[in-house]
């Protein structure tokens, strides 16, 4: 990670979403064998809660991606400016080298 990057690593957020989705899947398999209404209601409540957590995590990921995209765009613009400056400096060096050559001859 570069010291100027505005976002920490996003893989942990992705891992968190995957874990939460797996939890929903695992709970679905467990409850599919039950005919108990209380168990079903609890499963629905837990599933809704987990889905809300997944959405929150995805929103964090969206925010991080937005910050990273903006930072990358600004960095790319800065690189463009520096490349132009390099070209101008190289031209100036060539001009000065030519002046030195002319003075020596």
Image (cartoon, grey):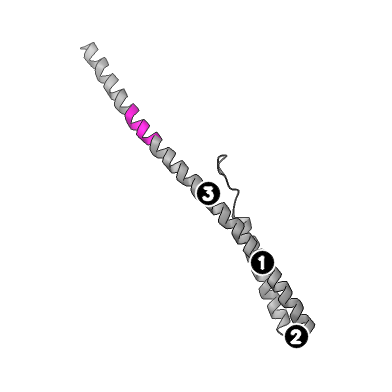
* Tag in front: 1 or 2: 1
Q: Earlier in the sequence, mark 1 or mark 3?
A: 1
Q: Tell me: 90 left or right of 16.
A: left
Q: CA distance from mark 2 to mark 3?
A: 45 Å
Provide residue 24's location: percent of width, then percent of height: 68, 73
Residue wearing tag 3: 68
Give the answer, above or below, for where 2 lies relative to 26. Answer: above
Q: Which mark is residue 34?
A: 2
State the image quarter where residue 18 is shown: bottom right
Name the residue rendered at 60%, 59% in the picture.
Answer: 59
Q: Quadrant of the C terminus?
A: top left
Mark 1, secondary structure of its residue: helix
Q: CA distance from mark 1 to mark 3?
A: 24 Å
State the image quarter where residue 80 is shown: top left
Residue 100 is inside the magenta segment: no
Q: Quadrant of the N terminus?
A: top right
* Tag in front: 1 or 3: 1
Name the residue rendered at 57%, 54% in the picture.
Answer: 63
Q: Earlier in the sequence, mark 1 or mark 2?
A: 2
Mark 2, secondary structure of its residue: loop
Provide residue 12's location: percent of width, then percent of height: 63, 56
Provide residue 104's location: percent of width, then percent of height: 24, 11
In the rendered structure, which segment of residues is drawn in magenta? Answer: 82-89
Q: CA distance from mark 1 to mark 2?
A: 24 Å
Q: Tell me: 43 left or right of 79.
A: right
Q: Which mark is residue 52?
A: 1
């Amino acid at each position: 990670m570069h010291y100027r990057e505005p976002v920490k690593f996003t893989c942990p957020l992705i891992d968190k979403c995957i874990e939460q989705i797996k939890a929903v899947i695992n709970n679905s398999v467990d409850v599919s064998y039950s005919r108990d209404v209380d168990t079903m209601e609890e499963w629905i409540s837990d599933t809704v809660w987990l889905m809300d957590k997944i959405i929150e995590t995805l929103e964090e990921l969206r925010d991080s991606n937005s910050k990273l995209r903006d930072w990358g765009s600004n960095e790319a613009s800065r690189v463009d400016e520096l490349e132009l400056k390099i070209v101008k400096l190289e031209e100036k060096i060539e001009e000065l080298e030519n002046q030195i050559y002319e003075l020596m001859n």
